[in-house]
Amino acid sequence: MESLEASSLISFCFLLLIFLLLRRPRRSGSGCGLPPGPRPLPVLGNILDLGTKPHRTLAEHARKHGPVMTLKLGTVTVVVVSSHEAAREVLQKNDHVMASRTIPDVVRARDHYKHSLVWLPNSAKWKGFRRACSMQLFSRQKLDVTEMLRQRKVDELLDYLHENSVRGKAVTVGQAVFTTVLNLISNTLFSIDLTHHKENSVVEFKELIWGMMKEGGSPNISDFFPALRWIDPQGARRRMDAHFSQLFAVFDRIVEERTLKRASTDGSPRSDDMLESLLDLRDSSELNREDINSILAVSIYDLVVAGVDTTHTTVEWAMVELLRHAEKMAKARAEIEQVLGKDTKVQESDIPRLPYLRAVVKETFRLYSPFLLPHRAETEVDLCGFKIPKDTQIMVNLWAMGRDESVWQDPDRFEPERFLELKIDIKGTDFELIPFGAGRRMCPGMPLGYRMVHLILGSLIRSFDWKLANGEATETMDMNEKNGITIQKAKPLCAVPIQLRR
């Protein structure tokens, strides 16, 4: 499927060759001070150099051209950073002028980018949104208050896995985790589940979110040739607009049901969620229905991009590696049982007492983090001795940084033990490992993502042994990837949970 998308993209580029040659801006001369990079083709630039796994192909180019490298993607100038030293210059030293975003065309649907914490420029509005988000959703106090909700959703996941264990039936691990985290977010917003684990349940909402994530992570010719945005040649923005229409229809139904509940005199308790607060503002004429839909859409999409996708892919890859390295799975389980006892559930408060589990998560982040969301230079700026022009797009290749042989011994090997010795954290201060970013644009949902990854992974290790479906051997497991917002396993992990005997 990806190869078909890539070939159609290339074909379209060639069809527009003559037109774009006439519109192509003059390339800057050698005096501009841009970093070196692979030679661009006419019109296409370096689009063909991306391949279907750009995190890998650009890491290869960086070995030849250096850790700060220039690409020309259509008419867009991109600088790719592939070392922790260069990432520090982008995200710390020059953070004040590189904290804005390059806006993908798909998030222009319904003007989503104008309200999104992810895509707003570095501005007073963005700072206010981020401050409110950090205080109202992701502060330690707020997360402690909602801990029981997360525990309940993980318990539901374990119940689902237990049912399949009794039947000897395989589960798609990433999909099960995705459902868990999506329901956690929907309960935070609406106090209801919007999807379910069982196969015969309603799946439309889950598919809608998958569709939005797919559009957000797929290459779009309009991003390489902004002059073509007005015709939306691949139809990506139109599809995203349709997704938003479906999303708003879901919100309309939920808002109507809650409005009827609020008007009821049956003594039902008031819900303690975001929707209740928004409806209070509506009743005081501070918000209208369209405002509420926009806020909920931003909350759902931003939280899904920042939390759901990262959490489910990280847990899936961690389980893949632990299945391939049975001795490390046994070591992680032994630590949990030694610290907690054999009959105690993993809780968030246990995470600081489980250093090997934390090391497994760090090692998974090191091996399977792709790119940070793109930054944009607001002014001309010096970067590692190069002159970076205003409006240049900056991409930080975390995958290349995680495979840097000057930092990591035997970098392709899954070796959590390295983090028992290295005092490297993932909270944005140690640039060797920054899966959530760093600086002003560091993911505000990092505290929630950190808790969820460890809680879910620890619970899967603690509660079950696992074997691959259909007699597949761990030694020959398909490790191919597909690229998106995160690095996903091309063939999802299907495994049979086996209830552990205590």
Image: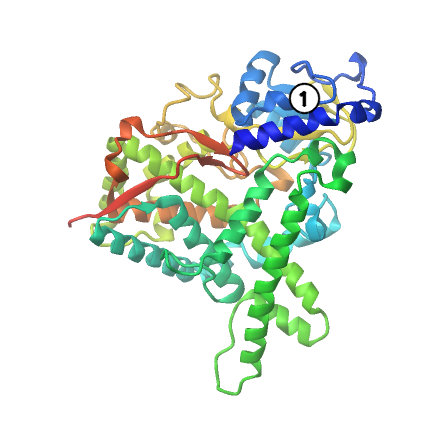
Q: Of 314 and 363, which appears nearest the observer? A: 314
Q: State the image quarter where residue 7 is shown.
A: top right
Residue 424 horizontal side relative to residue 496, left or right? right
Residue drawn at (51%, 27%) of the image = 399
For badge 1, the amino acid type reads Leu
Vertical placement of residue 442 versus 241, above or below: above
Q: Can residue 24 be seen by looking at this rendering? A: yes
Q: Of 390 and 353, which appears nearest the observer? A: 390
Residue 104 position, x and y percent, is 68, 40
The residue that mark 1 highlights is 71
Residue 227 horizontal side relative to residue 49, left or right? right
Q: State the image quarter where residue 470 is shown.
A: top left
Residue drawn at (67%, 76%) of the image = 283
Residue drawn at (70%, 53%) of the image = 110
Disc count in the image? 1
Residue 46 position, x and y percent, is 66, 21
Residue 142 horizontal side relative to residue 113, left or right? left
Q: Can residue 468 be seen by looking at this rendering? A: no
**CA neighbours of label 1 inside 10 A, class few (<14), some (14 to 19), many (20+):** many
Residue drawn at (64%, 46%) of the image = 118
Outermost left residue:
502
Residue 206 position, x and y percent, is 48, 54
Q: Of 79 and 5, which appears nearest the observer? A: 5
Q: How is the image coloured?
A: rainbow
> Element type at marker 1?
strand
Residue 111 position, x and y percent, is 72, 51
Q: Of 497 and 285, which appears nearest the observer? A: 497
Vertical placement of residue 164 versus 356, above or below: below
